[in-house]
Image: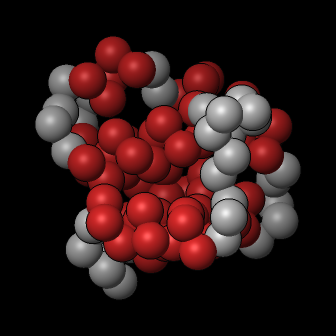
């Protein structure tokens, strides 16, 4: 699957969640319907990887994804920011 197509799917899923069109469970179910870890593994792209796994693991106790993190990922996916793991980690730590 083409990388830009997968990035668009992730942007749409996160955006729909943030606009309250879908809930977290629906976002997760749609993700596993549309993309697989194997699709993501084809590319070494941090934004693709982090966005996919933020949704994939969002319901797990050890990996609580905040709305602030989703806002940051969405902004990176739509080109507002260049993804930075350090910035993402700063956002996560500031919300704990």
Classify residue 82 by image quadrant: bottom left
Residue for point 44% across, 71% down: 90
Q: Tell which of 59 and 52 is nearer to you.
A: 59
Classify residue 66 by image quadrant: bottom right
User: Can I make out residue 28 in this image?
Assistant: no
Q: Position of residue 40 (x, y in %)?
A: 32, 29
Residue for point 23% across, 37% down: 2
Residue for point 19% across, 24% down: 42
User: Can I make out residue 2 in this image?
Assistant: yes
Residue for point 25% across, 48% down: 46
Q: Position of residue 84 (x, y in %)?
A: 27, 66
Image quarter hosting the N terminus: top left
- Against 63, residue 82 (above or below) is below
Q: Tell which of 6 and 48 is nearer to you.
A: 48
Specify whether 60 is left or right of 93.
right
- Against 17, residue 54 (above or below) is above
Q: Position of residue 33 (x, y in %)?
A: 61, 23
Judged from this view, the residue extending furthest toward the left is: 44
Judged from this view, the residue extending furthest toward the top is: 38
- Against 81, residue 8 (above or below) is above
Image quarter hosting the C terminus: bottom right
Specify whether 73 is left or right of 85.
right
Q: Tell which of 68 and 78 is nearer to you.
A: 68
Classify residue 68 by image quadrant: bottom right
- Against 87, residue 49 (above or below) is above
Q: Position of residue 3 (x, y in %)?
A: 24, 42
Specify whether 63 is left or right of 86.
right
């Amino acid at each position: 699957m083409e990388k830009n197509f997968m990035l668009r799917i992730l942007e749409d899923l996160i955006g729909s969640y943030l606009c309250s069109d879908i809930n977290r469970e629906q976002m997760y179910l749609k993700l596993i319907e549309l993309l697989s870890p194997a699709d993501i593994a084809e590319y070494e792209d941090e934004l693709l990887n982090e966005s996919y796994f933020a949704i994939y693991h969002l319901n797990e106790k050890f990996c609580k994804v905040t709305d602030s993190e989703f806002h940051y990922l969405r902004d990176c996916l739509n080109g507002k920011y260049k993804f930075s793991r350090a910035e993402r980690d700063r956002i996560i730590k500031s919300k704990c």
